[in-house]
Image (cartoon, rainbow, N blue to C red):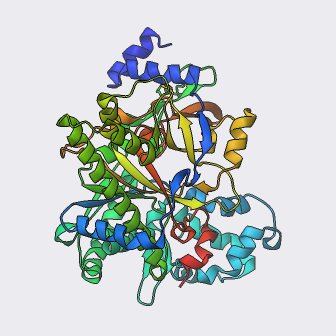
Amino acid sequence: MLSKEDIVQLNNEGINPLKVEKQIQNFIKGFPYANIVDVATINNGIKLIENSEKRSFISIYDDFAKNNKITKFVPASGAASRMFKNLYGFLGQDISVEKDKFVNYFFNNIEKFAFFGELKKILDKNEIKVSEDNIREIITNLLTEKGLDYGNLPKGLLLFHKYKNEIRTAFAEHLTEAGLYAKSKDKNSDIVFTVSPEHKELFEKLYEKLKQTYEQEYETNFSIEFTEQLSSTNIIAVNLDNTLYKDENGDFLFRPGGHGALIENLNNIKSDLIFIKNIDNVVHEKYLSDTIEYKKIIAGVLIEKKNKIASYLKYIDNNIDKLDEVKTFIVDDLNYNFPESVDVDFEICKSILNRPIRVCGMVKNEGEPGGGPFWVRNVDGSVQLQIVESSEIDKTDSNKMKIMENATHFNPVDIVCSTIDYKGNKFNLSDFVNYNAGFISEKSVNGITIKAQELPGLWNGAMANWNTIFVEVPISTFNPVKTVNDLLRKHHQN
């Protein structure tokens, strides 16, 4: 554990040694796997919205939005470097374009990319022709500071889509979405973007450039906040033997705690309803109709359930005896099964009802089993819905693997939530985190292999003790850009 010298050094740096001790214990013990007991499917944890229900849920949301504050929360701090992994790999190999399918497809369609116009200007300036013989120079000018520097920018700042009179970044598409489905009272569109400190100024400049035009186009008033992942959520790195890693100067290494750290940023938002969506899951505006429709639908589902929760909590406060009705609602509507050994009373019901609530869109799995919606047994014996990543499932357990392989849906990170209780007070979201749902991985630093730790994922362990409802949404609402060639897919092209 920590030596006296370590403790002195940590204190001198303003770091709580007890917090570091806990992190080291996590490295030593590891984290337990999720105890999945069944996969969530249609009518077994996933709600299918009938056509006859759609208009009602949309109306519920539209009426709510007229008098309440709506906020979009967009994690946008991740670098785009992984998006260009295949291009970097090509640069590091002595291989022809014809033999690299990814790069061959990239080059043969290069003029279709929204960023091609800007790239071509740089290539022309440097007298580089767009030819297969110059492919390595072209990629270098795309990815490095010699040109567009896309390998070092966040996805939100990359040019994604072509339009008649403009070329839009992923950031701009989120402004568009907010103007079309996330307008609240007084026609305000509030968005909170989490960004890295080194890119914050670039986001601010882009926003100032777009603000007036987009406000006029979508008849809204934007209120944009750029927040940073809190440094207090960083986690210490250790060597493979769980001793503290120190660099050549004797300094500790703290690494970002992963997207689970963003629960603190989410906790700082006071809004009546919050949409959560990743920065790269956007489409060309002409394909937005399904997204708008289902965003409103899942929000309507949440509002309806939250209103019902509020009425039951008021019954409990006023000693109105509807225990059986409340229990049925918790099981059937909130997807929470009580521990068999517990004699359920009003206090237990109240503790379950009075939690943050989220409705998560789920997309049909088109052949790739993995993380998604599952029924999970908690330590106390209760069973409820959770989003579980494949890394949280014990691959040596044949029963768990069979459950995972039967998955019919996966998690696209399409979430709407309420973090306000029935009395109008904001929940402290830290109270609802399962801190035993973290991750440990190995990384390389200066040629040395170390162990890194991530906090419970934002939509996994960080929301583990929320009330959760899953709703099927169409695959057309899920169009992430994981590789640069994804931008050549239909929903990203004009």
In the image: residue 98, left or right of residue 494: right
Position of residue 303 measured from the top left corner of the image (x, y, whole percent):
31, 57
Q: Is residue 300 visible?
A: yes
- Please give the name of the residue rendered at 40% of the width and 22% of the height, measured from the top-left corner: 19
Q: Is residue 126 visible?
A: no
The answer to whether 276 is drawn above or below residue 21 in the figure is below
| Nearer to the camera, 89 or 260 | 260
- Please give the name of the residue rendered at 34% of the width and 75% of the height, measured from the top-left corner: 180
| Nearer to the camera, 45 or 156 | 45
| Nearer to the camera, 446 or 412 | 412
Identify the residue at the far bottom of this view.
164
Position of residue 228 measured from the top left corner of the image (x, y, whole percent):
35, 48
The answer to whether 268 is drawn above or below residue 252 in the figure is below
Position of residue 211 measured from the top left corner of the image (x, y, whole percent):
27, 74
- Please give the name of the residue rendered at 64% of the width and 37% of the height, measured from the top-left corner: 393
Identify the residue at the far top of this view.
4
In the image: residue 456, left or right of residue 487: left
Quarter of the image holding residue 30? Answer: top right
| Nearer to the camera, 148 or 19 | 19
Position of residue 72 measured from the top left corner of the image (x, y, whole percent):
33, 60
Quarter of the image holding residue 217? Answer: bottom left
Number of numbered discs? 0
The answer to whether 177 is drawn above or below residue 333 in the figure is below
